[in-house]
Image (cartoon, rainbow, N blue to C red):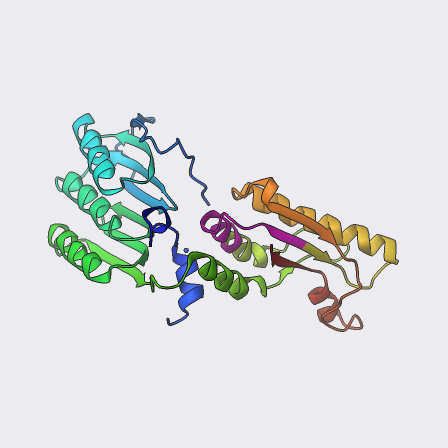
Amino acid sequence: MPARQRRHFRKLLSLALLAVTTLLALPVDNGIPLQPTTATSATLFDKPQFAIQLGRNRLRISGVTVSAEHEAALLQLAREQFTDAAIEADFQNTVIVSLDWETLSARLLYLVAATESAQASLDSDRIEIRGVSQDPADYERRRHFLREAAGPNRDLLSDVIAVDSSVSFDELCRRYFASIAGEPILFRQSGTGIRESSYPLLDKLAEFAFDCDNSRIAVIGHSDATGDADWNLQISRARAESVAAALKLRGLAAERLLIEGRGAAQPIASNETVAGRERNRRIEFELR
């Protein structure tokens, strides 16, 4: 697989695709690593946090560091290990961390480099990484390297799944989209408010859009049969627009969204019951 296609997969993507067997859209800086930016300093009362997020040719390193030298070392390691990635750094400098913080943060970054996509974090109690890898042997070797440094008093939670590099990226995207697009987004009656139970699906779609960025997504609104046909058509489109707005807030570019309203013409349940009408007040998605 060419180098430019090696970093496509996030945790939610892998779980849905393999099933046994991927909110954040990171800024791209034309592939040029950014210099560390120091935010407001962490205080004595903050629990130190360090995080790494790797997406498609994007790497973000953020959180607590102990010195300018530590930050420089992390950026140097990032440039060496992620040669194709645009790098963003957002550091907070403090000395109120454990003595092994420099070593653990560097080894965690080194471990993430053995994945195609990942989210990783370090704090005073635990280290966590989730993602996918096309080279599980290399990943395991690096994980052991980190485990040695972490010692017995810090948990290391690793949930990284191997993917088959023979499957094309476009096919992976189609499979993942099919696995999530059937889930319903539900609305309150006669309104455009999205029920909170549908928020996880919006998060999944934003994850999908981040990785499968060659695709456009049609957002198609449907209504129940309450009200006349014109009203149902209007409310169905308004609901589609509400969902599109929620996806934009999660980082999806507006030009990748197509919005349609189909009224009550395509029910999936009886409009004679409350439960049926709720199911008919829905959004469907198509990959185009």
Left or right position of 73 against 20: left
Quadrant in the picture for residue 134? bottom left
Residue 56, x across and y down, in percent: 39, 46
Quadrant in the picture for residue 59? top left
Q: Residue at x 33, y 40 (%)?
A: 85
Left or right position of 156 against 227: left
Residue 283, x across and y down, in percent: 66, 58
> Looking at the rendering, in which quadrant would you find the N terminus?
bottom left
Q: Residue at x 16, y 38 (%)?
A: 102
Task: Please report the bounds of the magenta region as a residue range.
Answer: 204-219
Residue 88, x across and y down, in percent: 34, 34
Magenta run includes residue 208: yes
Question: Does residue 17 sit above or below 208 in this rendering?
Answer: below
Question: Does residue 109 sit above or below 43 in this rendering?
Answer: below
Give the camera-side residue of 227 and 16: 16
> Looking at the rendering, in which quadrant would you find the C terminus?
bottom right
Magenta run includes residue 121: no
Q: Residue at x 83, y 62 (%)?
A: 226
Quadrant in the picture for residue 220? bottom right
Residue 139, x across and y down, in percent: 21, 57
Give the camera-side residue of 99 and 142: 142
- Residue 188 appears anywhere in the view: no
Of all residues, the one furthest to the front in this rendering is 2
Question: Does residue 105 sit above or below 36 in this rendering?
Answer: below
Give the camera-side residue of 170 and 238: 170
